[in-house]
Structures are given as C-alpha cells and as structure tokens.
Image (tube, rainbow, N blue to C red):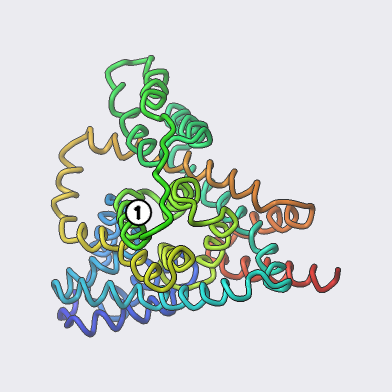
Amino acid sequence: MAAERPGAWEVSRVLLLVGLAAFGGPVAHVALMRRQVVERRRWVGEREFLGMFAACNLIPGPSSTELAIYLGYRLAGWPGLVLGGVLFIAPAMLLMLGIAVAYTRFGATPAGSAIVHGVRPVVVAIMLWALVDLGRRVAGRWPLLLVGLAVLVLSRLGANPLLLLLAGGAAVVAPRALGRLRPVASVAVLAAVGWPQWLLAGTRGRALPLFLTFVKIGAVTYGSGYVLFAFLQADLVDGLGWIQPRQLVDAVAIGQVTPGPVFTTATFLGYLAAGVPGAVLATLGIFLPGFLLVPLLARIVRLIESRPGVRSFLDGVNVAVIGLIAAVGLQLGTASITDGWTAAIAALGFPVLLWRPLSAPAVVLAGAVAGLGLWLAS
C-alpha cells in the first residue's frame, strides 16, 4: 500500500539526490528513482511506477528526466513538476558547465589532448553497444531492419534527422495494406522524403538561434538519448558550424562520466557556442519540451492505446532511431579511431559494456588513463 503523498520540497530533495548520484545513464537514473520512491518511501506502487516510465518512453525527450518530472507532478502537482525537474537536472548542468570551462582552457594542452585521444574511441564503443541494445527490439523483423538500414544510408548522404524519423514512422504505417510489397514501399517512402537539408549558418546574434535549435532538438529527439547526437551533428556541426566534430565526440564522452541526464551535453555545447549564456539557453531549450509534455502524458497514452496506426508509427520511429545512431556511430568512429591504440581501446571497451552496461563511466575513465599513459610513455 502506498504511503501518504509527500510535499513538493520532499519530492524535489529526493530527485536532487538522484541527480547527484545517478552515474551510468538512464538505466541508472530509473533504478535509483525506483529504489527511492517505490522501495524506500512507498510513495508509488511498483505497477504505477513502471506504467509512468512506459508512458515517458512514448514522448520525445530524455525519458529518465521526464520520469523525474512526472513523479514530481504526480506526487506534488505543478510545484513538484517544476522544482523536482529543475533540481534533478541542476547538478549535471552545473558540473557540465564547469567541465566546459576547463575544456576550453586546458583541452588543447598536450596532457588534455592525450586524455581526449584515449576517451574518443570509448565513445565509439558506447555507440556500438547502444546499437546492439536497441537493435534487439527489432531482431527477426527484417522489414523493420530494412527501414533502419535505409535511414542509415540516407543519413550518411545528408538527409535531415527529423525528416528521417517522420519518414521511418510513415514507412511502417503507410504500406500496411500492400502485403508483400511492404518492404519495398517502406524504402520508397523513405527515399521520397529523405533528401538533404541545410540550415542557414549565422555568425552573429547566436543566443536566440541557439535556444530555438535546442528547443527543436528536445521536441523531436525520440527513442534514445543517443539519437540526440544525430541532431547535434546536423544542426550545430553541419548546419550552423558552431561546433567541431571532435568537440561533439568529447561532449558525448563527458556526458558518460557525469551524473544526471545525458541531455546536459547541451550545457557543454552551449558554452562552446556562446559562453555561459549559451550554456543556460541550450539547457533550458532542450529540457523545456519535456516539462510541457509531461502533464499531457495521460492523454497521449490513451491516444496511443486506442489507435493501432499510431503504435505502428512509433515502431517506425524507433527503428529509424537505430539507423540514425548507426550513422552517427560511423561518423564518430571515423573521427575517433585514428591509429592502432585507439582501435584497441574501442575493441576492449565494447565487450565490457555488453557485459556491464552501467560501467560506462568507468570505461570512459579507463580510456582517459590509457590516453594519458600513452602520452607519458612516448
């Protein structure tokens, strides 16, 4: 039986502690939240907690962060939603901001360069692990695998990630009545909408474009935190040109060794693009859609449960996510694996992640030590 519902500050204090301690990505965040609110305090029941998490996976944005926001809202209303969400995000944001300042000052030193040289191949191993983990969902369903492969190819050719996610959903929904022609029709749908897109690059007045870019990314990044990097690559690297490819790889790596949401990578990149105001605006922008969507979750769940076509569309979006992650992984691999040592680090890191997924922070730190050791030995 669930205990008496707590106040906004009590809920928010627990979410702050989770945000401070939750190393290891969304799986660790959810496990710690479950321990705190289900097992220790009995604020919600097991079934209710799992239902809330399942609902958060149906909307774009970081699912574990949205679960924290949802818990705050369910337990303490609007004050819990705002305060709980902010305090869950704040530790990672502030830590990422401090790391970004240090990165800009010391990242180009020989020791700093050696560390990131060892960390970058670990990021490639993490992306490969994410592909394997997500790919299990569509194992044995070769039409969906074909859609994912088409998304991978079109992404490498320069297609816009948002269009590819929409096309992935359409590719599964539209051809349902075409019988055996379904796989061919799916690829045809993708080819029809997956043309290259370019953003207008700007060099002045970055604050508003940066904020709007991260609002858009937060509103459309669906299925996994790792697909976030496809949008960052398309918008900040290829489109606006404010971030270098290797800076994006470094941001991914730093996101693995800090607690809290992976989406606080936005803080790091916002600082590189426009200083402290950019860090604040990027963080606000990427998390804002989650704060707005969580109160609507009950209606969204009812819609999805009552419409088979919507469920099929989400299946297509999920497989498109896998294709986008594969495309980003290939690009990161090209930028990160530059010699035998980096190839060895990636090859060693991947099986460790398969064996112990929550070990990502330790594997990243091991890569940093290896890079530093190679520099000292040279």
Say if 225 sits above or below 317 in the image: below
Q: Secondary structure at mark 1?
A: helix
Q: Label 1 sits on what residue type?
A: Thr
Q: Position of residue 228 (x, y in %)?
A: 43, 53
Q: Position of residue 20 (x, y in %)?
A: 42, 79
Q: Position of residue 103 (x, y in %)?
A: 57, 72
Say if 324 sits above or below 209 in the image: above
- Is residue 140 among what the camera can see? no
User: Where does label 1 land, which residue?
Assistant: 213
**Which residue sits at x=39%, y=44%?**
200
- Is residue 116 among what the camera can see? yes
Say if 215 sits above or below 69 in the image: above
Q: Position of residue 176 (x, y in %)?
A: 29, 22
- Which residue is more in the foreground, 276 or 194? 276
- Which residue is more in the foreground, 14 or 341? 341
**Which residue sits at x=31%, y=30%?**
170
